């Protein structure tokens, strides 16, 4: 016997509600999916528009033409000044200071007496020894006369001659003792500060005063050994000092050391400079600049125009070309260069540029290769071969 299922009235009444819920759910899911797809399409369009606007914007840069200027190889070194003659004066013997014949900072001539020690009985001893020497001299001369008449033996004459020489040597030795107690200037120059006082006991070797010959002056400095072939005796130098800003003292190389320092591989060089007014003093720190070799004509640009990275040195060169609409525009293109020596704000270019090239001087950080740019040259970077610090 087969029985058939007959839905109840309640089941039939609730079936449309299930379909309604399912339809609403599908509608909501379709709306969400459409909204999500629309949002992504909008975002992609906005991003594309923003990139297009960025690419369309042309950065503003300043430019200048590369120039050809004369260059001469220069070397810079640091050194110290020293006097052509200089010494700390002292006596070889000790004693009490009896006379001071100079003032601090005084100019003295060679041989001028500066100081004397108390002689005590040194002069009396000298007179005693001189008297003995005079007697021995008289005895010797008498013996020589009597020897002619056979009045004395030859041995007596020889003995008296020896006594005479010994007495004379004793006089010379005592005179040297007296002379050692007098301090004289060994050369002409300028005295420093007095280091002893009148009546003071001064031990042997005590510095009395320093004496420096200030004209001419020497400046000793070091250069690398590879520079030996670029400098020679007579090469002109310019010396600058912090004590005299903005002033340069001219001189010339006068000598080299006879060996290179084995630890630093540096060669010591000496230059001579005139110092007629005594403005320069020994011990001053000095900067020495030398020019050597022939004058060269090199392409010159400001140092700020060069970008240095791991691939090399490059600049941006401006080229003129037509865009899609046929209008002329300025294109910045990267150009690798080989840089040379620098001076002040400038750098020389050995390869990669010519004097006909127009280069970007500011705004390089905003650029990439083959980028269109706008040019505004109202402000330019400094381009001075000898810049001077300015107070602002």
Image: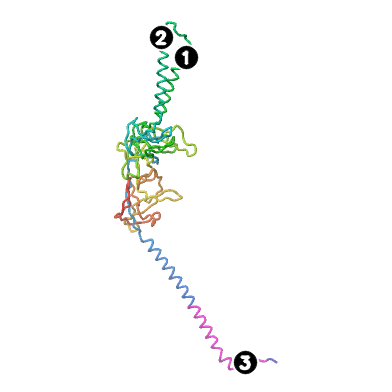
Question: Disc 3 designates what residue?
Answer: 6
- Between disc 1 and disc 3, the foreground one is 1
Question: Disc 1 designates what residue?
Answer: 159
Q: Residues within 10 Å of mark 2 (few under 14, many from 20)?
A: few
- Between disc 2 and disc 3, the foreground one is 2
Residue 118 in picture, x, y percent from top left: 39, 33
Tell whether position 28 is magenta: yes
Please state which of residues 266 and 65 is positioned toward the viewer in this rendering: 266
> Does label 1 or label 2 sit earlier along the sequence?
2
Please state which of residues 20 and 355 is positioned toward the viewer in this rendering: 355
Quadrant that contains the C terminus: bottom left
Question: Disc 2 designates what residue?
Answer: 145
Question: At 40% from the left edge and 31% from the top edge, which residue is drawn?
Answer: 120
The colour mode here is rainbow
- Estimate the spatial distance between the alpha carbons at disc 2 and disc 3, rounded to whole Å: 186 Å
Q: Which residues are magenta?
A: 3-31
Quarter where residue 38 is shown? bottom left
Quarter where residue 220 is shown? top left
Q: Is residue 266 above or below residue 346?
A: above
Residue 235 in picture, x, y percent from top left: 36, 34
Question: At 35% from the left edge and 50% from the top edge, which residue is drawn?
Answer: 359
């Amino acid at each position: 016997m087969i029985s058939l299922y007959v839905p109840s009235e309640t089941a039939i009444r609730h079936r449309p509600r299930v379909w309604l819920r399912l339809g609403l759910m599908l509608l909501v899911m379709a709306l969400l999916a459409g909204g999500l797809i629309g949002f992504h399409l909008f975002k992609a369009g906005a991003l594309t528009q923003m990139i297009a606007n960025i690419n369309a914007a042309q950065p503003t840069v300043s430019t200048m033409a590369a120039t050809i200027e004369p260059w001469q190889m220069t070397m810079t070194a640091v050194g110290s000044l020293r006097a052509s003659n200089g010494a700390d004066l002292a006596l070889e013997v000790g004693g009490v200071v009896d006379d001071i014949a100079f003032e601090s900072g005084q100019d003295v001539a060679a041989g001028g007496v500066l100081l004397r020690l108390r002689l005590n009985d040194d002069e009396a001893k000298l007179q005693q020894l001189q008297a003995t020497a005079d007697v021995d001299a008289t005895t010797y001369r008498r013996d020589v006369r009597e020897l002619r008449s056979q009045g004395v033996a030859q041995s007596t004459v020889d003995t008296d001659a020896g006594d005479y020489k010994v007495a004379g040597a004793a006089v010379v030795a005592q005179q040297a003792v007296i002379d050692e107690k007098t301090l004289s200037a060994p050369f002409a120059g300028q005295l420093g500060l007095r280091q002893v006082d009148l009546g003071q006991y001064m031990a042997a070797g005590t510095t009395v005063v320093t004496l420096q010959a200030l004209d001419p002056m020497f400046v000793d400095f070091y250069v690398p050994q590879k520079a030996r072939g670029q400098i020679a005796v007579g090469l002109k130098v310019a010396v600058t000092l912090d004590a005299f800003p903005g002033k340069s003292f001219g001189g010339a190389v006068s000598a080299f050391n006879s060996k290179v320092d084995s630890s630093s591989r540096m060669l010591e060089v000496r230059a001579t400079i005139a110092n007629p007014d005594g403005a320069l003093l020994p011990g001053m720190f000095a900067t020495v600049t030398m020019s050597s070799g022939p004058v060269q004509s090199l392409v010159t640009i400001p140092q700020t125009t060069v970008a240095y990275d791991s691939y090399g040195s490059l600049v941006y060169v401006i080229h003129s070309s037509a865009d899609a609409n046929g209008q002329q525009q300025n294109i910045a293109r990267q150009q690798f260069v080989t840089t040379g020596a620098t001076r002040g704000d400038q750098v020389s270019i050995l390869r990669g540029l010519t004097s006909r090239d127009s280069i970007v001087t500011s705004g390089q950080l905003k650029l990439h290769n083959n980028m269109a740019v706008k040019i505004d040259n109202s402000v330019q970077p400094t381009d001075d071969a000898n810049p001077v610090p300015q107070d602002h």
